[in-house]
Image (cartoon, helix red, strand yellow):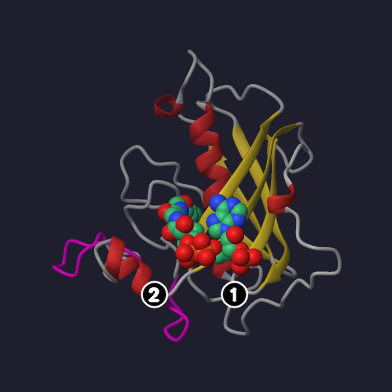
């Protein structure tokens, strides 16, 4: 894919192991029920489902729905970028540290009709300090289907205070809807086993 130097790790950058508590080969579940990417409580969201893979990688699925169109009958490019962002974010969650997307590069190779299930594979290509380098590929309707979208990203590790300062704090990141008075937002789950990304 076309990508800038900003999403390519320096040569020789190591790829860390997932956190020992991170699941392997298991469904990851939503990190927040109202997340547009993965939340089952979001009425028009992507409802992306993901499983962790060997190493630092994730396999995810997202079916393009009627509410995700740009041109008639075709997925909106921004929605596809969101699906990639979400699946990429699930990779850094396996490190059990809070990260946010700093940069996301996307190549659109094929139009994606409504009803298509995208099989997305994401992996970490290296971590340097606070910077995690990631890449992703989405194939149409099968693991070996035609490649529709490729993405590369730089995620930046942030303190938990990032979510408290800019969002609604720590509530709602455990699969709840954040309506219990704690507010919806992000949770630093490094010591709780809960997800940490927004
Ligand atoms: C299971 C969980 C699944 C979760 C899935 C969630 C997926 C969705 C994830 C998201 O969409 S997160 C929401 C979208 N992102 C944001 O809202 C982030 C908004 N931006 C920020 O908060 C700050 O700009 C950021 C934390 C990214 C960086 O600010 P900082 O002041 O903390 O860091 P700094 O600017 O010093 O940058 C740290 C390093 O990253 C580099 N960097 C930061 N932004 C960059 C950028 N955009 N491009 C390239 N490099 C960048 C920067 O050059 C620097 O490199 P060096 O250490 O080598 O000097």
The residue wearing badge 1 is 95
Q: Position of residue 133 (x, y in %)?
A: 68, 60
The residue wearing badge 2 is 160
Segment colored magenta = 177-195
Q: Residue furthest top?
A: 72
**Residue in the image at 62% along x and 38% along y:** 118
Does residue 129 appear in this view? yes
Q: Is residue 193 magenta?
A: yes
**Residue in the image at 64% along x and 21% along y:** 111
- Report the label total: 2
Depth check, front residue: 177 or 80: 80
**Residue in the image at 72% along x and 27% along y:** 109
Mark nearer the N terminus (2 vs 1):
1
Within-10-Å neighbours for mark 2: few <14, some 14–19, many 20+: many
Q: CA gap, disc 2 to disc 1?
A: 14 Å
Circle 2 or circle 1, nearest the eye: 2
Q: Position of residue 156 (x, y in %)?
A: 55, 64
**Vertical arrangement, residue 194 with respect to residue 148, above or below:** below
Depth check, front residue: 6 or 133: 6
Give the side of residue 111 with respect to residue 9, left or right.
left
Give the side of residue 123 with respect to residue 64, left or right.
right
Instruction: Name the image quarter holding residue 113.
Output: top right
Q: Position of residue 94 (x, y in %)?
A: 59, 71
Disc 1 element? loop
In the image, is the residue at mark 1 within 8 Å of ligand 1 by its beta carbon? no
**Residue in the image at 70% along x and 59% along y:** 123
Give the side of residue 185 with respect to residue 196, left or right.
left
Within-10-Å neighbours for mark 1: few <14, some 14–19, many 20+: many
């Amino acid at each position: 894919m076309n990508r800038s130097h900003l999403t390519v790790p320096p040569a020789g950058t190591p790829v860390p192991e997932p956190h020992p508590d991170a699941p392997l080969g298991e469904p990851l579940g939503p990190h927040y029920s109202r997340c547009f990417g993965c939340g089952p409580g979001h009425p028009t969201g992507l409802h992306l489902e993901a499983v962790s893979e060997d190493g630092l990688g994730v396999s995810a699925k997202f079916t393009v729905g009627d509410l995700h169109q740009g041109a008639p009958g075709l997925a909106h490019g921004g929605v596809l970028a969101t699906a990639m962002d979400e699946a990429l974010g699930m990779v850094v969650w396996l490190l059990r540290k809070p990260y946010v997307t700093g940069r996301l590069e996307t190549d659109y190779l094929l139009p994606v009709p409504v009803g298509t299930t995208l099989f997305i594979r994401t992996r970490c290509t290296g971590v340097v300090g606070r910077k995690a380098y990631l890449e992703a590929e989405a194939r149409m309707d099968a693991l070996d289907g035609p490649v529709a979208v490729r993405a590369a990203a730089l995620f930046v590790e942030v303190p938990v205070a990032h979510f408290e300062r800019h969002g609604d704090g720590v509530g709602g990141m455990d699969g709840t809807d954040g309506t219990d008075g704690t507010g919806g937002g992000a949770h630093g789950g490094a010591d709780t086993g809960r997800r940490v990304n927004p």
